[in-house]
Amino acid sequence: MRELEELKTNYTRVKESLSLCVRELAFLITFFILFFTLSIYLITIGLICVCKYVTSYMDNHSGPCHGKLYLFNSDKMNWSSSRASCVSKGADLVTITSQTEQDFLVSKIKQTQWIGLSDLETEGHWVWVNNQTLNETGVQFWFSEGPTEPDNWKKQDPSGEDCASLGDSNGNFQSWFDASCKKKKKFICEKKLLSTSIFGNN
Ligand SMILES: [Ca+2]
Ligand SMILES: [Ca+2]
C-alpha cells in the first residue's frame, strides 16, 4: 500500500514536470516563430529599401552599362549655367550621337531639357560641346513636323535661338528644338565611363 502511494506521488511529480516542460517548449516555439517572422519582415523591408535606392539611382544616373553616365538635373537653368553645372561635376552637357542614344534619352524625359548643342559661334553652324559637328556625328533629330527647327525664332528673344533642347514645352520629346539660350530648362549631363560605348566613340 505504501509503495502504491509512493508510485502515485512520483507519477504526479513526473506529470507536473512534463506539463511544465510542454509549457516551456510552447513558449520557446512561439518565441522562435515570432523571432523568425520579425527577421523575415526586417529582411524584406531592407531588400525593398535597397531596391528602391538602386532603382532611384539608376533613374537619375542611367547609362553606366552603356559606357556613359547620365545625370538628369531637376534644377532649371539657362544653357550656359546648365553647362557650367555639368562641368563642375566632371561632366558636360549631353552629346547625342546615335538613334539608340536619342531613343534612350527620349524614354527618360518628361520635360524639355538642354542638350550640349549650339550655334552660338556661327549662326546656323551647330556644334556639340565636344566640338563635333552634326556632319561628323551623322545623326540629327530636329523637329520636322509643321514649322521645322532650327528656326532661330526672334520674336521672344531678338538675339534668336542658339541653343538646342531635347523636346519642347508642347510635349514633343522625340525631337530637337533651338531655343533662346537665356531660357531656364532642366538639362542632361553626360560623363564617359569607358573609352568605347554602344553609342559609339563620340
Ligand atoms: Ca541660332
Ligand atoms: Ca526654335
Image (cartoon, helix red, strand yellow):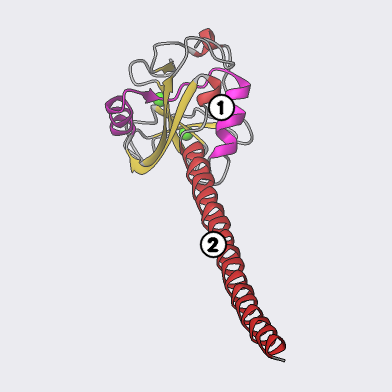
Residue 123 x, y percent position in the rendering: 39, 19
Residue 135 x, y percent position in the rendering: 53, 9
Which residue is found at the position 61% from the left and 66% from the top?
29
Residue marked by disc 1: 142
Q: Residues within 10 Å of mark 2 (few under 14, many from 20)?
A: few
Number of numbered labels in the structure image: 2
Name the kind of residue labelled 1 in the image: Trp
Give the image quarter of residue 188: top left
SS class of the residue under badge 2?
Answer: helix
- Give the distance between the C-alpha atoms of the residues marked 1 and 2, in whole angstroms: 61 Å
SS class of the residue under badge 1?
Answer: loop
Residue 138 x, y percent position in the rendering: 58, 11
Residue marked by disc 2: 35
Name the foreground residue: 66 vs 183: 66
Residue 120 in magenta stretch: no
Name the foreground residue: 107 vs 29: 29
Judge whether 188 appears above or below 30 on screen.
above
Q: Residues within 10 Å of mark 1 (few under 14, many from 20)?
A: some
| Residue 83: numbered disc | none
Is tag 1's residue or tag 2's residue first in the polypeptide sequence? 2
Q: Which residues are magenta?
A: 79-108
Name the foreground residue: 6 vs 73: 6
